[in-house]
Amino acid sequence: MSVDTIPGFSRVEIRTGGKVEIAIAAYELRQLAGELDRIAGLHHNDESLAILAHHKIKATSKMLRG
C-alpha cells in the first residue's frame, strides 16, 4: 500500500445545536475512544492501525453530523 493512501490526520465533526446533540456527541466520543483503545491494542502494523482508526473516526463523524 502506498504511503500516500495512509491517513495521517482524522477528525470528528459534531453538531452543537443544543444540549441533546452535545450529550449524544459526548456519549459517541466516549465510545470512539474505547474503539481507538481497542484498535491500538491490535497486533497489526502502524499503517493498518491508522486505516482502521481513520475509518472508525470517519464513521463516527458522519453519524454525528447527521
Image: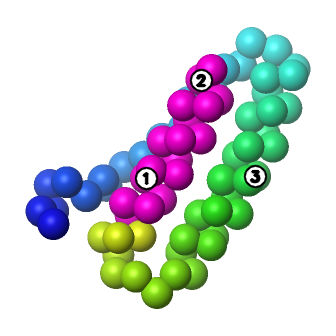
Query: Magenta stretch: residue 63 in it?
Result: yes
- Total tally of numbered discs in the picture: 3
Give the image location of residue 21, x and y in percent: 79, 23
Q: What residue do we see at 74% from left, 34% from top?
A: 25
Alpha carbon separation for disc pair 2 and 1 = 16 Å
Give the image location of residue 6, x and y in percent: 25, 58
> Does 1 sit above or below residue 19?
below
Q: Quadrant of residue 36?
A: bottom right
> Does 22 sit above or below residue 17?
below
Query: Magenta stretch: residue 54 in it?
Result: yes
* Amino acid type of the residue that numbered disc 1 sits on in the rendered structure: His
* Amino acid type of the residue that numbered disc 3 sits on in the rendered structure: Arg
Q: Which mark, residue 30?
A: 3
User: For mark 1, what is the residue?
Assistant: 54
- Secondary structure, magenta segment, majority class: helix
On the rendered structure, is 45 left or right of 29? Answer: left
* Amino acid type of the residue that numbered disc 2 sits on in the rendered structure: Arg
Query: Earlier along the polypeptide chain: callout 2 or callout 1?
Result: 1
Q: What residue do we see at 81% from left, 43% from top?
A: 27
Alpha carbon separation for disc pair 1 and 3 = 16 Å
On the rendered structure, is 53 left or right of 15? Answer: left
Please provide the residue range marked out in magenta: 50-66
